[in-house]
Image (spheres, rainbow, N blue to C red):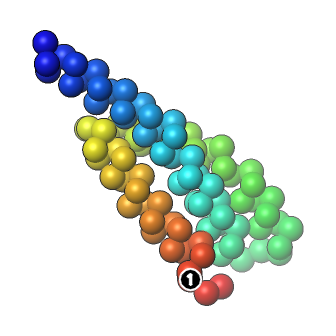
Amino acid sequence: MASRRRARLDAALRVLAALIGTLPLAVLGSVCLARFAPFGEATRSAVGFSLVVPLWLAAMCVAFLARSAARAWGGCAALGAVLLALAYWVPQ
């Protein structure tokens, strides 16, 4: 009985990681793409804005493939920290 509850909780936390934890990844990923792409400013903005949804869907798929909720949330946190550092602390 306890293992069944634990499996349901793990599945629910993985779904939350896929839905909530991957949105900041998609936004930060598009900010990094828009910041470092070798195009004009208007083109970079359009590319960054239009790639948010595909990046979010790809990140959701990867989060659903995680073995556990801890790995899903850990991956979101680690990649989010890297993208945040690239987006705001790396000089252009």
Can the viewer see residue 91?
A: yes
Residue 2 lies in quadrant: top left
Residue at 56% over, 83% down: 90
Q: Position of residue 18 (x, y in %)?
A: 46, 38
Describe residue 56's horizontal placement relative to residue 74 as left or right.
Answer: right
Residue at 28% over, 30% down: 10
- Name which residue type carries label 1: Val
Relative to 90, say whether 87 is above or below: above
Q: Residue pushed farthest right?
A: 42
Q: Position of residue 23 (x, y in %)?
A: 57, 46
Q: Position of residue 52 (x, y in %)?
A: 66, 50
Q: Quadrant of the N terminus?
A: top left
Describe residue 28's horizontal placement relative to residue 63 as left or right.
Answer: right
**As rendered, which of 45 and 22 lies closer to the eye?**
22
Task: Please name the residue that numbered disc 1 is placed on.
Answer: 90
Relative to 23, say whether 38 is above or below: below
Describe residue 46's horizontal placement relative to residue 70 as left or right.
Answer: right
Q: Position of residue 12 (x, y in %)?
A: 37, 27
